[in-house]
Amino acid sequence: MPQRPGPTAPLAAIAASLQQERRRTGLSLAEVARRAGIAKSTLSQLESGTGNPSVETLWALSVTLDVPFARLVDPPRPTVRVIRAGEGPAFASERADYLAVLLSSAPPHSRRDLFLITAQPGTPRTSEPHMPGVVEHVVLCAGRASVGLADDPVELAPGDYTAYPGDAPHVFRALEPDTRAVLVSEHN
């Protein structure tokens, strides 16, 4: 009985994934091949999209590169996400004219959340310490604000950036109406 041709491996996707994951690890082609127990020429062919990988070869490479097998053969596709001004889940402060809109929560294996802050002069938004290791990054977009550690905030103008330990008491005080900032909360 003649054999039917089987499905072909997605060579371009495998090639791109192998190149990306090898760059991520910082390992040379020779070192990845050695650790995976395959010939350097085999890996070179796979990265150029001309090889014909076996499941065993791909498993060995996924273990060596410390990535799931599926990431090598069907890598995640970039997605485009748009949140228009005035949209997104919003959270208001009880004690200050301060609104935080969640723009992006941390995906799996990532440790950051992204917020758009809108604040008005008056009562500042004071925050108690977050989990140990949290760092907050703030880029002021419009207005002026006093931002940072509660006992030593810095004044920011549009385009200014600051980072401070979020695991210490901190403050965001708008100094002009309609002050806006982007805040990234990084969880270490």
Image (cartoon, grey):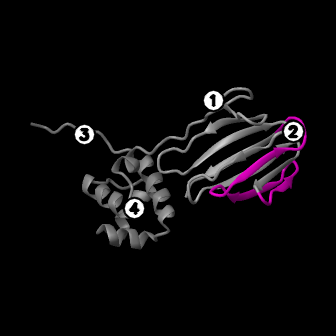
Residue placed farthest to the right in the image?
A: 176
- Say whether marks 3 and 4 touch (CB < 8 Å): no
Residue lying at 72% horizontally and 58% vertically, measured from the top left: 163
Circle 2 packing at 10 Å, graded few (<14), some (14-19), many (20+), is some
- Say whether marks 1 and 3 touch (CB < 8 Å): no
* Residue 96 horizontal/vertical position (percent): 77, 36
Residue lying at 36% horizontally and 46% vertically, measured from the top left: 70
- Say whether marks 4 and 1 touch (CB < 8 Å): no
Q: Earlier in the sequence, mark 3 or mark 2?
A: 3
Can you tell which of label 4 and label 1 is closer to the viewer?
A: 1
Q: Residue under label 3, please give it.
A: 6
Q: Which residues are magenta?
A: 151-179
Of the residues shown, which amino acid type is indicated by label 4? Leu
Q: Earlier in the sequence, mark 3 or mark 4?
A: 3
Q: Residue under label 4, please give it.
A: 65
* Residue 149 horizontal/vertical position (percent): 74, 57
Q: Residue under label 2, please give it.
A: 121
Residue placed farthest to the top in the image?
A: 87
Horizontal side of residue 156 vs 52, given as left or right: right
Along the viewing direction, whichever of 124 and 135 lies nearer the viewer: 124
Can you tell which of label 1 and label 3 is closer to the viewer?
A: 1
Residue 33 falls in which quadrant of the image?
A: bottom left
Residue 100 belongs to the span the image colors magenta: no
Circle 3 packing at 10 Å, graded few (<14), some (14-19), many (20+), is few
